[in-house]
Image (tube, coloured by chain):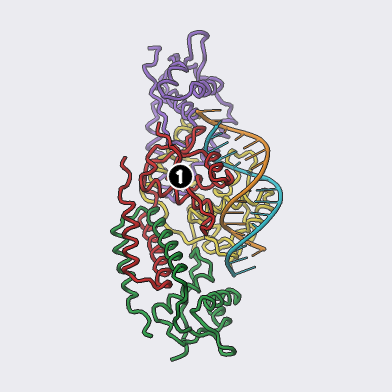
Chain colours: A red, B green, C yellow, D purple, E cyan, F orange
DNA sequence: GTGGTCTAGACCACG
DNA sequence: GTGGTCTAGACCACA
């Protein structure tokens, strides 16, 4: 019950992020937006590796990270599934990471000399795209 | 007022960015905010390296990147100075980097499961702090 | 400053835990007991791998897990160091994991038909050995 | 009173233990606490497999392990029954498993940075709940 | 079939 | 020198 059709994860060769991180980000995104819902099965390590034409170990590494972060859970011999959401980080840790992310982003944007209005408008649009969260 | 007093750049050991990038970001930030103004001289490679207790090669590499990007210019035998503002990046390059920054930031925020309103409010405040740009 | 002498981590072939997990547990233990103190450098990936006669990737995997858990932090090109302690898990997550650990342990002990007094005495001794925490 | 009503063993999808081990642990627990008493019959392999919606092979494997450990005994053509209590494990085997369990538990608790007093108090309560052992 | 671990060896960025 | 990533291929436990 609850199988994924294809799970269109894309990896871009030009992307500076390592492949495994792209997979992690992609899956995390799809779970956050509800495209991947609670209990859904993910493509197999070997399957996704073949689909993306990369080494299975790379996929396994990404899945392992997602599992240790609590996004996925493995059922022995069956595969990996979207795990029930739970609060994994302490409030202080979340705040710290949020601060870091904001700082880095502001640095970059200021360095590019882009107006505040433009930045906010863009982010408003991007973030609203993630408003419809898990329907479960 | 053509000399810098100290150039308080800070290196954080916990920061995931390489040290050279921290320097580049820091200088770019200070130029963008006007803390480092046109014509001001930067600390010498050896001086800053000693002040930060890091390898001079690392400082040199950062300065080289800033120079090639047009933020600084070297005057033979005198040292490095803040360069006159010119179009440092092509429009397409700026857009590309902006897209990347936005993408990375959105990814991180989604991963932390922080609401769009909170993100926008925070960024609004942070960006306004940089409104008084270059006095040039 | 603050180098490790040898860091006697031991891996037992008879141990059912995978090698990388043994390393993770060992380091975590030494940090928790203060044997490895804040800012101390860990043996290099290649060095520890050679010392334990295992593959460097296995050490790297263990170190990566410890880093993502917040026990260690890497300084580019320099090595890995004990990170400042911070609260990484939410209270609810901690409680959940504690419950799981207690449950599993009680299951095992009951299955072995070992008296409660004996269990408590043993644990009392084991846990007190970790009383002298970080002197920093 | 030689028949079990249902044998409420529960399988948790999030549990890191393999399903077969969950069954073994569950049955061992129920025998140890006296919920399953001497001579009681266990549900059939197929029945339990259907009830838990898992592969019959998995149940068979768990029953085989329990039988080989002396918790259950099969009566040809009748089914599996709780075996009379005998020394199921040698003293050295018991000690070995106890050591392992203690070690694993201490590792986990240390990793969660939970105080010794809290751990002991909790275990004290949990273990006392199992004081009324086998009525046999 | 599934995921998990380990080995071996390569290449990269950083200092 | 340091850690980080990726590939290739092997072996294991589990269902």
Please provide percent x and percent y for residue B5.
46, 86
**B65 in relation to D42, above or below:** below
- Chain for mark 1? A
Q: For the N terminus of chain A, which image quadrant?
A: top left
Residue shown at the point (38%, 26%) measured from the top left:
D132
Instruction: Classify 10 Å Cα crowding around label 1: few (below 14), some (14-19), many (20 and above).
Output: few
Residue identifier under label 1: A8
**B71 in relation to D16, above or below:** below
Please provide percent x and percent y for residue C114.
49, 31
Residue shown at the point (44%, 81%) measured from the top left:
B85
Residue shown at the point (33%, 53%) measured from the top left:
A129
Please provide percent x and percent y for residue A59.
54, 45
Figure label count: 1
Mark yes or no: residue C125 visible: no
Q: For the C terminus of chain A, which image quadrant?
A: top left
C70 or C40, nearer to the observer: C70
Q: Element type at marker 1? A: loop
**Residue farthest to the top?**
D77
A71 or B79, nearer to the observer: B79
Query: Is B77 left, or right, of C135 in this rendering?
Result: right
**D79 in relation to B45, above or below:** above
Mark yes or no: residue D96 visible: yes
Please provide percent x and percent y for residue A100.
41, 63
């Amino acid at each position: 019950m609850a199988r994924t059709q294809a799970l269109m994860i894309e990896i871009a060769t030009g992307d500076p992020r390592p492949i495994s991180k792209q997979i992690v980000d992609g899956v995390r995104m799809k779970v956050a937006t509800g495209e991947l819902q609670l209990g859904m099965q993910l493509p197999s390590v070997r399957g996704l590796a073949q689909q993306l034409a990369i080494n299975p170990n790379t996929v396994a590494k990404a899945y392992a990270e997602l599992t240790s972060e609590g996004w996925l859970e493995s059922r022995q011999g069956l595969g990996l599934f979207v795990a029930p959401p739970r609060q994994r980080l302490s409030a202080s840790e979340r705040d710290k990471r949020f601060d870091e992310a904001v700082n880095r982003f502001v640095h970059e944007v200021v360095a590019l000399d882009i107006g505040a209005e433009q930045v906010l408008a863009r982010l408003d649009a991007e973030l609203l795209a993630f408003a419809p969260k898990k329907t479960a």
